[in-house]
Structure formats: structure tokens, C-alpha cells
Amino acid sequence: AAGVIQSPRHLIKEKRETATLKCYPIPRHDTVYWYQQGPGQDPQFLISFYEKMQSDKGSIPDRFSAQQFSDYHSELNMSSLELGDSALYFCASSLIVRTDTQYFGPGTRLTVL
Amino acid sequence: AQSVTQLDSQVPVFEEAPVELRCNYSSSVSVYLFWYVQYPNQGLQLLLKYLSGSTLVKGINGFEAEFNKSQTSFHLRKPSVHISDTAEYFCAVSFQGGSEKLVFGKGTKLTVNP
């Protein structure tokens, strides 16, 4: 079965640079969520989208922005990167009518040097 | 505010022994409950979930969990563990009728020794 696809899987950036993470949900899933998992930490909710509209917002820094496109894929844009942004970024998807179950992608590991 | 507490950060056990990973939650509204497993350098895989109905839920890989409303707990159990069960286990909740975002516990590192 098709799963959530995230790209790139690994990304290395310098401080103050910009990064873009991409997420392709499971086919027919209309809702996308982004989570950040710092080293040795639990995943923290950042933001979610349904039908290209932001549906909820968590502890996402103002330096980060995200959007969902007409084909339901989503991008997380991160600017002015800081060392503390180094983390594993997960995308999850679900059907709005079944938001009780989110399916996670493999994550993008971002390292900021 | 809603929160999830996983009481044990690390649980070492021997192969073929039973294991219980504890999870308690705090919420003023009804919740959905989940257990996810994360193998090293991998994503989160859903083990099982409780939405409603029977309080005993069975998941993949021989795991099960029991929802106890009065104790606000959702402990994960397996009667006999394997080396391959070594992983990080996260308990999570989402809130019925509200945001679908998941709130995770801090995780429990299960290490199965031969």
C-alpha cells in the first residue's frame, strides 16, 4: 500500500539558510500534519492543513511557514535556520472523515551546522 | 490543558518475558488514544488505537492495550517480547470534537535483551 512520502530524507544546512521540506500524502488523503521531533524528544505538532486551508497551528516558529497545494502535497518552508532547528520533521496524513488515524511518513532529518 | 505521561523512560526486559509500558493522560474532554512505535532512524508506526467500544484493543505484532477511563490510563502490554521489539514506544492522544493534532508522551525506550 502507498505510504506518506517525504523528501528529502536528509538535509544539511548552515545557520541562517533556508530549507524546504516536502510531503506527499497517501492518495485520497486530504489532511496533512507536520510534527517536529528534537533529539531524544517526543514529536511536537507544528501545523495542519485540510483542503489547502490551515486547520490548526501548534508551536511553529514565525520563521516557518507551510502550505498545502491543490494536489494535496504540502511544503514546510524554514528560514533563518538556527542550530535548534536540527530535528526530525514528520509529515502525517489522514482523511478528514477519519481524522482518528494519522499515517506518518519516514521523516526528514534536518541538520543545521 | 491536555497531557500524556509515560511513567517509564526506559524498560529493559529479557526475551520472551512479558512487558507493560505505562501511559496516563489528562483531559477534560473525551479522547482517542494511540500507541506508536519508532524503530531506530525510522518513522512512527501505528501499533493500535482506542476510539470507542471495547476497552481492550489488540494491535500489530502481538501488542494489546487496555483503556481505563477511571484511571485515565492506556497501558500497552505484550505477553512475550522478542529482540525485534526493541524500539521507542510513544503513547499519544487526540481530542474528540476538537483539533485532530496528536499530543505525545515523552516515549519509553524498550530494550529486549537475549
Image: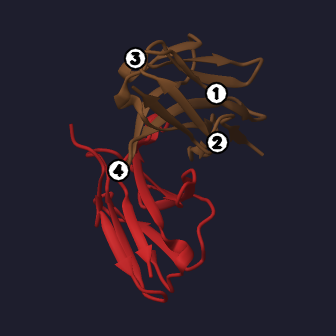
Chain colours: A red, B brown
Q: CA distance from mark 1 to mark 2?
A: 25 Å
Give the residue number, with chain letter if any, for mark 3. B62
Label 4 marks a residue whose chain is: A
Relative image position of residue B20 (x, y in whole percent): 58, 21
Relative image position of residue A90 (x, y in whole percent): 42, 56
| Mark identifier at residue A105 | 4
Task: Give, as a three-letter code, the residue at label 1.
Answer: Arg
Q: Nearer the viewer, residue A81 or B107?
A: B107
Task: Work out whether B66 lies above or below B100.
Answer: above
Q: Residue drawn 33% across and 57% down?
A: A72
**Is the C terminus of chain A in the top left, top right, bottom left or bottom right quadrant?**
bottom left
| Quadrant hosting residue A10 | bottom left
Q: Residue drawn 62% across and 40% down?
A: B9
Tags 3 and 2 in contact by the CB under 8 Å rule? Answer: no
Task: Give, as a three-letter code, the residue at label 4.
Answer: Gly
Q: CA distance from mark 2 to mark 4?
A: 23 Å
Label 3 CA crowd tier, 10 Å (few <14, some 14–19, many 20+): few
Label 1 marks a residue whose chain is: B
Task: Give, as a three-letter code, the residue at label 3.
Answer: Gly
Using residue B18 as the reference point, say whether residue A28 is left or right of it.
left
Q: Tell which circle, 3 or 2, labels the residue nearer the N-terminal end.
A: 3
Q: Residue drawn 59% across and 13% down?
A: B55
Q: Tell which circle, 1 or 2, labels the residue nearer the N-terminal end.
A: 1
Q: Nearer the viewer, residue A30 or A45?
A: A45
Which of label 1 and label 4 is nearer to you? 1
